Image: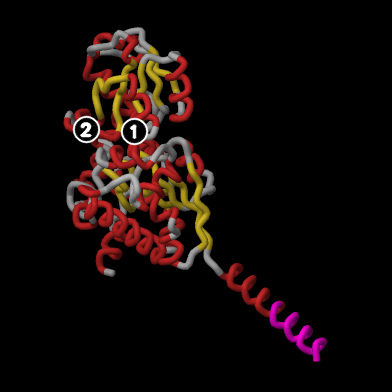
Amino acid sequence: MKTLMKSTLVKTLAMTSVLACSFQVGAEEVTIGYQGMFNPLKYAIDQKLIEKETGYEIKWRKFDSGAKAITAMAAGAVDMTVAGSSPIASAASNGVEMELVWVTENIADAEALVVKNSSGITSPSDLKGKRIAVPFVSTTHFHMLFALEQFGLSEKEVKLINMQPNAIMAVWQRGDIDGAFIWDPALGKIKQDGSVLISSKQLSAWGKPTFDGMIASKEFTAQHPEFVTDLIKVVAEVDAKYRDQKETFTADNPMAISVAKLAGGEPEGVVEAMKLYEFMDINTQLSCQWLGCGSEGGAVQALKATSEFLLKEKKISALQTDYSVFVNPSFAKSAKAK
């Protein structure tokens, strides 16, 4: 009897294993990149909300900069990724087959040029000869160059150093740089003994807006439109969850804990940093200010203007004739209808 029971148990376990393997083999897989910005998306990633909604197996890859994320997409290593508007514009100008499907956040005050208190920099003219760190081909790099143009300074008059966020924090502490144009968590840390000279909010008001967005390979969106729609639906829901509790959002909130876990830093810093961003609802996303209105839409115009500036600065070699082909609001429309 024991032998029979043992045999039955072994067969049952074997069948369970086969069924499990069959399920795993049959599950769709997608690789998605993200960066260290403090946003509700991190909560969705940490809690596996997109996996639960779609049934897909998702491999999440963290990138230090949008430039690295774009390189991975161009190489086919990621299907979707978050990147800043400057690297997205650069990718579009270079003909990468991708499209913007969602604006994860309006950057506003969440990126800023901070100068060290001991640097002697109190006005834009004091930047001459100073060492300023910035991740090249990022939104902060674009705004740094635009700021210099507005200040009447050239790149040759300021020592711009290509550096990733983690490295910036280290050299800042050693006193090897005089300032940095960066985002959180590095931004919050260098503000402790530095002051903001100018933020992206002011530079955007001067006519060169920046944002972070979710882009996807066109091949992937063509093959998996339902997944992209469901992903946007989940992201819109967590954005709404944050907006609803923004005024009472504290460090012990599960979302703050998830964001700190994936982006780095402490939950207390997350609370303050997320206040600096604007997370738009679907109706705003689909408006002419962002994804809507075709070639006249805000996102398309921002990519075009950014590309024109990057060409002037010799960061890209040519412009596209139509940047609207790199912005696709159809998935947000489908998510709204669900």
Which dot marks residue 139? 1
53 shown above or below 232: below
Counting residues from the N terminus, which is met first, the one under dot 1 or under dot 2?
1
Q: Position of residue 176 (x, y in %)?
A: 45, 14
Q: Residue 263 is drawn in which quadrant?
A: top left
Amino acid type of the residue tagged 1 in the rendering: Thr
Depth check, mark 1 against mark 2: the one in front is: 2
Identity of the residue drawn at 24% across and 36% down: 108
| Residue span colored magenta | 1-13
Write down the residue under mark 2. 201
Identity of the residue drawn at 73% across and 82% down: 9
Amino acid type of the residue tagged 2 in the rendering: Lys
Q: Nearer the viewer, residue 189 or 128?
A: 189
Whether residue 285 is in magenta: the answer is no
Instruction: State whether the magenta stretch is mostly helix, strand or loop.
Output: helix
Whether residue 5 is in magenta: the answer is yes
Quarter of the figure that contains the N terminus: bottom right
Identity of the residue drawn at 63% across and 76% down: 19
Identity of the residue drawn at 71% across and 77% down: 14
Structural crowding at the residue carrying mark 2, measured as other residues with C-alpha within 10 Å and reported as few (<14), some (14–19) or many (≥20)? many
Q: Residue 155 is drawn in which quadrant?
A: top left
Q: Nearer the viewer, residue 214 or 12?
A: 12
For residue 254, say whether it is visible: yes
Q: Position of residue 153 (x, y in %)?
A: 27, 13
